[in-house]
Image: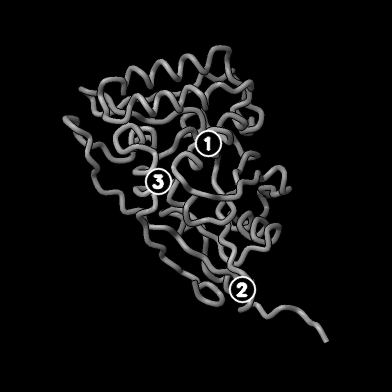
Amino acid sequence: MFGPIPFCWRMAVHVALMQPYLFPYAGYFGLVHAADVFVLFDNVQYHRRGWMHRNRVHHPTSGWRYVGVPVVKAPRDAVIRDIRLKPGWQDRLLDDIIAAYRGQAQEADAMLEWLTRVLDVDTSWLHEVNRHTLEATAKHMGLPCRWESATDLMITRDPDLPLWDWARQACGRLDGTAYLNLPGGEGIYPSEPFVDRGLGLGFIQPRLEPYDRGAGDWEAGLSILDVIAHCGAKGAGAYAAQYGVLWTVAQPGGD
């Protein structure tokens, strides 16, 4: 008689869940590389000082500067999906990135040509822009991944439940065998609930060493656009893929 497939025979499905950031740093794309399914948490509160609408690029004198997209003022408790962009957001973002990199990086022209195409998108919703640019950037760097949104999967943040509950929901919706997160999540995700549910729990450890920036100084944690501008798309993909995984709960069935 046929019965349930033993857990150790199941195909490993690594699930990650993050807020949709705007051209985030390389470590974020390390998590994309490690995940089989990447869920964008688009239904949590928007923070105007966060990374949803802005990121950091190189600046010749101060080391770095912010670039971003202008957003329409929203209520303090607005979620990411509610945030709209002001008209002309594409031109403002592209002009700032051109100013930062044209003539300053070996692969800048190729990066800017690609970026111009990517930003040619007809939407005024921040979450749509961020998903589009994340998917396009990962594809450009050769990082295959399945993308989902928390809204589409009906993953919700219940204030009466612990923070790790959204990981449980994501793995349950996607038949995940392990949940992955960036460094710093160890204090949010205790081991016991994952052990009880037969789920692995891991935290990627990016190895983001300095890369060749020509005459400019290396600045840690800049937008992935900085890596693409200096290393090219393939080089940026290889750079993002430099990480280890700290497993606080071992994966069922091994790697």
Disc 2 secondary structure class: loop
Of labels 2 and 1, the one closer to you: 1
Q: Indicate the quadrant containing the N terminus: top left, top right, bottom left or bottom right.
A: bottom right
Residue type highlighted by circle 1 = Ala
* Residue annotated with mark 1: 136
Which label was assigned to residue 227? none
Q: Is residue 194 above or below residue 58?
A: below
Earlier in the chain: of badge 2 and badge 1, it is 1
Alpha carbon distance from label 2 to label 3? 31 Å
Disc 3 secondary structure class: helix
Kindly identify the residue that appears in the image at 49 percent across and 50 percent down: 32
Kindly identify the residue that appears in the image at 31 percent across and 30 percent down: 107
Q: Nearer the viewer, residue 10 or 232?
A: 232
Q: For label 2, count other residues whose C-alpha is less than 10 Å away and answer few (under 14), some (14-19) or many (20+).
A: some
Q: For label 1, count other residues whose C-alpha is less than 10 Å away and answer few (under 14), some (14-19) or many (20+).
A: some
* Residue annotated with mark 3: 237
* Residue annotated with mark 2: 198
Tell me where residue 215 appears, x and y as whole percent.
Answer: 16, 30
Residue type highlighted by circle 2 = Gly
Is 243 positioned to the left or the right of 74 in the image?
A: left
Q: Is residue 175 above or below residue 5?
A: above
Farthest residue to the bottom: give it.
1
